[in-house]
Image: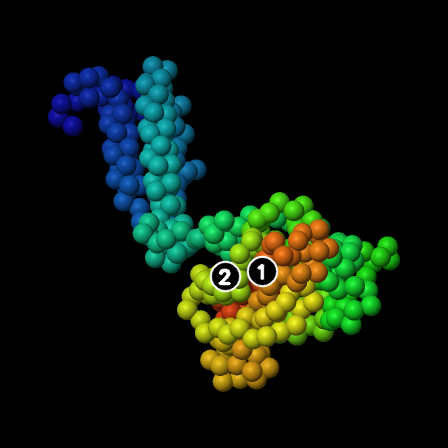
């Protein structure tokens, strides 16, 4: 200590530096701060950091030791040493807090992914809502018919027997009424068995010529199986004008199938429905067996999808329209079956179970 002189304190020998007249303990505090900075910043984990931090500011830490012995100094020295020690202590705490945050982030990243945080990993995807396949295809079909000039109309699901049967040439004593054997309400109304009731209501308004479609739910007393439900969706179509022919019906329905299902083999075969004459069924080749025959198509190779035909003169008469002046065709598309064929669903019941695993595939 060549450049120092000695002063005698009552309790302790203090070495002063010549140059700035400060107690040498001050440079000791600087040295402690320097060590703390180096050691804390080089800590590799939180435990090591905590241990090192305690060596400086803990109960037996270096800074604590200096403050503990401060009573050995004069009042003036106490002031300098106290202030310097507290400054150093605050600085060490700041370094400790910053480093602890840094190390904690790294350790959190390791524990949550096992590999640290990888910002290139795609976030978890939350699937948004989408339409039920029946709704989606119904809207697609509605758009298609609208593009051909058809208007969309609706009717009540709970219907009078007049619109559901009588106005459609199915009087109370007609044996064909048994075909639509169904539920009746106590007040005599009936959950409509087909959307053809909307046809009767539309004709009654006599705004001719007309082109309408009427999508909606229908109800029948059916034994439920893969292709039959007690509730189903139908889309009624009605086209009335002065020169409508069967070929118009065939052309429009073939185009409809092509638009909704792509190129499919179809066939028309004669069928009886009291409200059309002649009556037809449009069948589509069974997609499940390729026409060879299976349980779903009842071994016929075909699935009946669109009952249709030319509007029966009696239906026009019920509505007060002269069948000599106007002609028309009508169809009642089995909408659930269209969806079934479009997506190769082999059981209609799957569409109504609300099973998310099935519905999210569409
Ligand atoms: Zn089949």
In the displayed structure image, the side of residue 174 where residue 294 appears, left or right: left
Where is residue 47 shown, x and y percent of the image? Answer: 39, 49
Q: Quadrant of residue 223?
A: bottom right
Please give the residue where the numbered disc 1 appears in the rendered image: 329
The quarter in which the N terminus is drawn is top left
Residue 224 visible in the displayed image: yes
Label 2, label 1: how far apart the Cα atoms are? 8 Å
Instruction: Kindly check if marks 2 and 1 are in contact, taking CB atoms under 8 A apart as contact.
Output: yes
Residue appearing at x 56%, y 59% in the figure: 134
Residue 314 x %, y %: 70, 60
In terms of sequence position, does the residue under pointer 2 or pointer 1 come before the other? 2
For mark 2, give the secondary structure: helix
- Which residue is at the front of the view, 333 or 350? 333
Relative image position of residue 252 (x, y in whole percent): 49, 61
Vertical side of 71 occupied by 327: above or below: below
Residue bearing the label numbered 2: 248
Dot 1: element: strand
| Residue visible at 33% across and 29% down in the picture | 91
Residue nearest the viewer, comparing 22 with 356: 356
Q: Residue at x 66, y 72 (%)?
A: 272
């Amino acid at each position: 200590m060549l450049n120092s002189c000695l002063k005698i304190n009552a309790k302790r020998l203090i070495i002063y530096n010549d140059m700035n007249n400060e107690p040498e303990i001050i440079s000791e505090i600087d040295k402690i701060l320097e060590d703390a900075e180096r050691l804390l910043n080089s800590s590799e984990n939180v435990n090591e950091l905590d241990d090192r931090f305690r060596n400086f500011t803990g109960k037996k830490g270096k800074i604590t030791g200096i403050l503990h012995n401060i009573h050995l100094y004069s009042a003036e020295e106490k002031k300098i040493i106290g202030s310097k020690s507290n400054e150093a202590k605050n600085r060490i705490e700041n370094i400790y807090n910053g480093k602890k945050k840094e190390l904690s982030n790294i350790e959190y990243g390791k524990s949550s992914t096992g590999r640290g945080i990888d910002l290139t990993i795609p976030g978890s995807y939350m699937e948004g809502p989408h339409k039920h396949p029946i709704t989606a295809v119904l809207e697609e079909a509605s758009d298609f018919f609208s593009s051909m000039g058809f208007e969309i109309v609706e009717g009540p699901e709970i219907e009078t027997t007049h619109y559901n049967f009588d106005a459609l040439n199915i009087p109370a004593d007609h044996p064909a009424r048994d075909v639509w054997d169904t539920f009746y309400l106590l007040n005599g109304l009936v959950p409509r068995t087909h959307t053809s009731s909307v046809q009767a209501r539309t004709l009654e308004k006599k705004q001719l010529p007309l082109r309408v479609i009427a999508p909606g739910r229908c109800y029948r007393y059916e034994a439920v199986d893969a292709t039959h439900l007690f509730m189903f969706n139908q889309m009624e179509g009605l086209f009335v004008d002065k020169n409508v022919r069967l070929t118009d019906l065939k052309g429009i329905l073939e185009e409809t199938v092509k638009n909704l299902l792509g190129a499919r083999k179809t066939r028309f075969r004669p069928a009886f429905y009291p409200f059309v004459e002649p009556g037809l069924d449009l069948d589509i080749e069974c997609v499940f067996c390729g026409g060879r025959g299976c349980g779903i198509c009842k071994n016929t190779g075909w699935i009946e999808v669109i009952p249709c035909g030319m509007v029966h003169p009696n239906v026009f008469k019920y509505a007060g329209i002269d069948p000599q002046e106007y002609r028309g065709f009508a169809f009642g598309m089995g909408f659930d079956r269209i969806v079934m064929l479009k997506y190769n669903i082999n059981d209609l019941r799957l569409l109504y179970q609300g099973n998310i695993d099935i519905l999210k595939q569409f």
